[in-house]
Image (cartoon, rainbow, N blue to C red):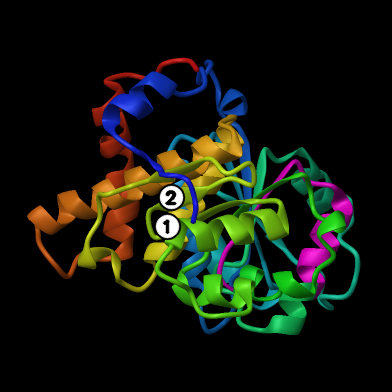
């Protein structure tokens, strides 16, 4: 059995605070989101918007060449980059520099082909990024990746099915214990449905959130929020806890008004007022 989890409250988050935002976009961190496909181009857009909504200063979207043009006209605030035509080709040039300089890189939203995802993740790992956040197909290929190739700071954002895949078995009643097993196996901070666990055994529980969060794209918003907060300078644990609580609380607000049936895009837009409602104003950690 795992140790009891700390309950996340606004008071806990207020005590943690936020990094000083400084006076320009460059002082609020750069986040790069890698993903997208012809079938699911919207996932990377939701993740990217969420990263900006939680205060990240600069956003880059890295997508397959086949959708680069259509992505560029949707989020006007983002720089858009194309992946190599062949996923097995190395990432070089300006894109390599951008990924290396990012405070956090999120890989997975919208990808739909395992082999290409694996090759892309390996190419990004070769760059030596500071903080890597994995979601969706990025999690699906993780068991096949040598952990020593990945950065020290790794954050995983699985749903229950993906958590079971990472474990190699079905989840048990001791959810925090299951997630601790994943955290220890991959030396990563793990966030799953309101449970956040670190490899050291620390854990937190978010009690907010409800059935309204079960909407297409909700996980992409959450992953983007985690990456955005990590890029701003929060530790992996605090980025995951802050994002999980903010995402869940945004869902609660939307469940009250307008009610069940809100979209993931509504969640992304609600992140900013939820965060500022806790802090009152941005404060330094």
Residue 183, disc: none
In the image, the segment drawn in magenta is 119-136
Q: Residue at the spot x=58%, y=45% of the render? A: 198
Does residue 139 appear left or right of residue 55 in this picture?
right
Q: Position of residue 28 (x, y in %)?
A: 56, 28
Give the mark nearest the N terminus, 1 or 2.
Answer: 2
The secondary element bearing badge 1 is classed as: helix
Q: Is residue 231 above or below residue 61?
A: above
Q: Position of residue 161 (x, y in %)?
A: 49, 77
- Residue 192 in sight here: yes
Rendering quarter of residue 231? top right
Residue 50, disc: 2
Q: Residue at the spot x=41%, y=43% of the render? A: 5
Question: Decide: marks 1, 2 in contact (CB < 8 A)?
Answer: yes
Q: Residue at the spot x=53%, y=63% of the render? A: 178
Rendering quarter of residue 212? bottom left
Q: Position of residue 108 (x, y in %)?
A: 61, 67
Q: Residue at the spot x=71%, y=51% of the render? A: 187
- Residue 46 in sight here: no
Which residue corresponds to mark 1?
A: 221
**Mark 2: few, some, or many residues within 10 Å (few <14, many ≥20)?**
many
Q: Gap in Å between the C-alphas at discs 1 and 2?
A: 5 Å
Does residue 77 appear left or right of residue 262 in this picture?
right
The secondary element bearing badge 2 is classed as: helix
Within the magenta stretch, is there residue 130?
yes
Label count reads 2
Q: Position of residue 91 (x, y in %)?
A: 86, 60
Q: Is residue 8 above or below residue 227?
A: above
Choose between 106 and 70: the one closer to the eye. 106
Does residue 124 appear left or right of residue 52 in this picture?
right
Within the magenta stretch, is there residue 121?
yes
């Amino acid at each position: 059995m795992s140790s009891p989890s700390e309950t996340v409250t606004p008071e806990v988050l207020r005590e943690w605070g936020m990094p000083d935002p400084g006076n320009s976009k460059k002082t609020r961190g750069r986040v790069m989101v890698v993903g997208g496909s012809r079938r699911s181009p919207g996932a990377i857009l939701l993740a990217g918007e969420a990263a900006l909504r939680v205060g990240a200063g600069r956003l880059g979207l890295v997508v397959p060449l086949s959708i680069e043009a259509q992505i560029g006209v949707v989020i006007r605030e983002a720089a858009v980059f194309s992946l190599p035509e062949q996923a097995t080709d190395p990432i070089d040039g300006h894109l390599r520099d951008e990924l290396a300089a990012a405070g956090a890189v999120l890989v997975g939203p919208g990808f739909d082909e395992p082999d290409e995802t694996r090759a892309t993740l390996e190419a990004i790992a070769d760059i030596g990024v500071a903080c890597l956040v994995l979601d969706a197909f990025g999690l699906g290929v993780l068991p096949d990746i040598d952990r020593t190739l990945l950065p020290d700071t790794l954050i995983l954002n699985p749903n229950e099915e993906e958590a079971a895949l990472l474990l190699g078995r079905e989840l048990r009643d001791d959810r925090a214990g299951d997630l601790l097993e994943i955290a220890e196996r991959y030396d990563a901070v793990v966030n799953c449905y309101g449970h956040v666990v670190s490899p050291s055994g620390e854990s937190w529980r978010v009690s907010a959130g409800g059935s309204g969060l079960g909407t297409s794209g909700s996980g992409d918003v959450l992953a983007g929020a985690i990456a955005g907060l990590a890029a701003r300078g929060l530790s992996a644990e605090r980025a995951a806890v802050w994002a999980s609580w903010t995402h869940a609380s945004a869902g609660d607000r939307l469940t009250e008004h307008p009610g069940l049936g809100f979209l993931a895009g509504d969640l992304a837009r609600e992140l900013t007022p939820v965060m500022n409602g806790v802090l009152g104003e941005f404060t330094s950690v």
